[in-house]
Image (spheres, coloured by chain):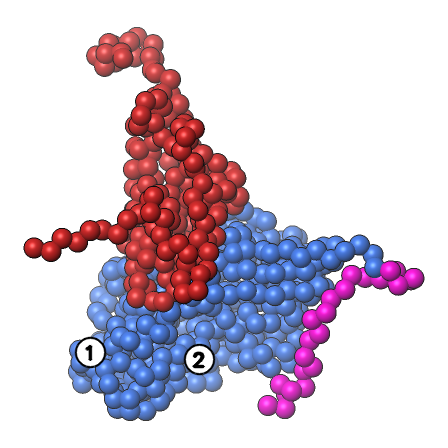
Amino acid sequence: MIDEGLKSELQKQGVYVTSLQELYNWGRANSVWPLTFGLACCAIEMMAASMSRFDLARFGAEVFRPSPRQADLMIVAGTVTKKMAPLVVRLYNQMPEPKYVIAMGACAISGGPFKQGYNVLKGIDRYLPVDVAIPGCPPRPEALIHAIMTLQEKIRNQDLTGPNRPRHLNAEVDGEYPVPAYGEHDLEPPKNPEVWQPPIMTRK
Amino acid sequence: MSAIAAIPPKSYEVKPKLDESGTPIGELLEISMGPHHPSTHGVFRMDVVLDGETVVKLKPVFGYLHRNHEKIGENISYLASMPYTDRLDYFCSMTNNWAYALTVEKLAGLAVPERAEYIRVIMAELTRLQNHTCLIGFFVQDMGALGTPMMYAFREREKILDLFESVSGARMMCNYMRFGGVRVDVNDEWIAQTKTVVSNYSKFLDEFGTFLTENEIVLARSQFVGVLPKELAINASITGPMLRAAGVNYDLRKVDKYGIYSRFNFQVPVGEHGDIYDRYMVRVLEMRESIKILEQALRDIPAGPVMDPKSKLRGFRPKPGEVYGRVEGPKGELGFYLISDGSPNPYRYRVRPPSFVNLTILEDMCLGHRISDAVVILGSVDIVLGEVDR
């Protein structure tokens, strides 16, 4: 590992020294392509974030791709209903690795104001591994920009080797998640135990 | 009722074209557009049957955003439903608030102070401006102009959202109106800002019009495409710009004269052919009329209170009865139907969403057109899925 002081000294001389990992992650972090995937109200704020005033292009994330095959990031923007949940998981499965998920807004995080409804999924984290969650109903475009910056930070700090390496570099881990189906009363299975477990309440 | 019976039920058996000997040429192709499709304006699915590129059958599939709005409304108090109405048609939270407040006021017999009426008109017309602006952006995007028209539309929308934010605290979900008035008063500075935005808006409309109104591609894609005949529009209870583009002069602001709309001098633009271009033009002209209303309202707004002192928000229990209240939303007639049994919650809470009703004739407009036109026709209907599925 190169010394930070020496690195900045070399940089002043016009020599840029980096590791392959940093270079690779730098490139990945600055070209996150989200999926054009609007579910409800938050999608409008997602569009507003990519439009003239907020200009998501400053962070390299303005290339909204309509096809999951070309996207890196799924922004779950809005209420996920039980009718839509299998399709959300299927779309996620169709995205190539490395892929990330942002849960945007109260509905995607927990069901939000519609949580008591009979047809609303109580959080997309029951089926998908969520990387960044943005609270708000709907979150402001600045909040989405902050979420993308947080995600970039996460991508920059990912190890390429070793036991903590991400899923897409680990051949033993499957990137596909089981798609729920409509059961007799509810979605089957009601959650993916690999990514979500109900919080344990301890009574004192 | 007799007019509705006059339209024969549609035959749903579709077959490919036959040649002279009676053998079919090619096959029909059934494709499912959506719910994840960039042109379906949210999570909406169309099961389209194609003969070549021509649409021969189109079945809309709803329900991907069914959020139990009505059932939740029956289980919470009258006031608690107000923020939920924001999330019906998330472009026009102000008009949704107004429709609901109007209905409950009718049920409880509350009066609205003069100043609050003016503020409501200002908010509703600003909402109409931003809704129509965004709609035109989306609709040109459906024709293939990815991004650029939307940039212009959202630039203007942000200015109006700033006004909403400074008075209600939220950009989109304003939750601003209350039974018997509005939540907070606006100050003179806000009115001055609104005047600036409104006076600059016609410049923007001129700019947008230069790019779009006589644009060759827009003309080719929209004229005589997706024609909605007048009789069908009336029979299918279409409302809003869709109905007026079909040539029916029906605007609730003129018909019901709810609020204080009878005081303003404005016209109702009416189309001639009922095609996509007419729908576009009706919306552009409506924005010009909205600017007129806004100018008059901002000039005449009186001083005074903004809440009826008799209105009681906490522990609100209206008398038993049923009521239907409606306003002219940017998308059409938005109505709320409430039954009260004297308890703090409504016994029945029903929304009459304009986008859902306007969407019912999608197949009639799309039949015989290309699949690419079906996308533009859907764009011109102006739907918001939060309202369609509720």
Q: Look at the image and give the residue range highlighted in magenta.
A: B1-23
Circle 1 packing at 10 Å, graded few (<14), some (14-19), many (20+), is some
Between circles 2 and 1, the one closer to the viewer is 1
Q: Is residue B116 magenta?
A: no
Q: Quadrant of the N terminus of chain B?
A: bottom right
Q: Could one spot residue B107 in this view of the protein? A: yes
- Chain B's colour is blue
Percent across and percent down for residue B192 are 28, 62
Residue kind at label 2, given as amino acid type: Arg
Q: Which residue is mark 1?
A: B313
In this rendered view, identify the residue nearer to me: B259 or A105. Answer: A105
Chain under disc 1: B
Q: Which chain is red?
A: A
Of the two numbered discs 2 and 1 on the same chain, state the one appearing first in sequence: 2
Closest to the observer, A93 or A142: A93
Q: Which residue is nearer to you in this view: B124 or A170?
A: A170
Q: Amino acid at mark 1?
A: Leu
Look at the image and tell me in which quarter the C terminus of chain B lies.
Answer: bottom left
Residue topped by disc 2? B253
**Residue B18 locus on image (x, y percent):** 84, 62
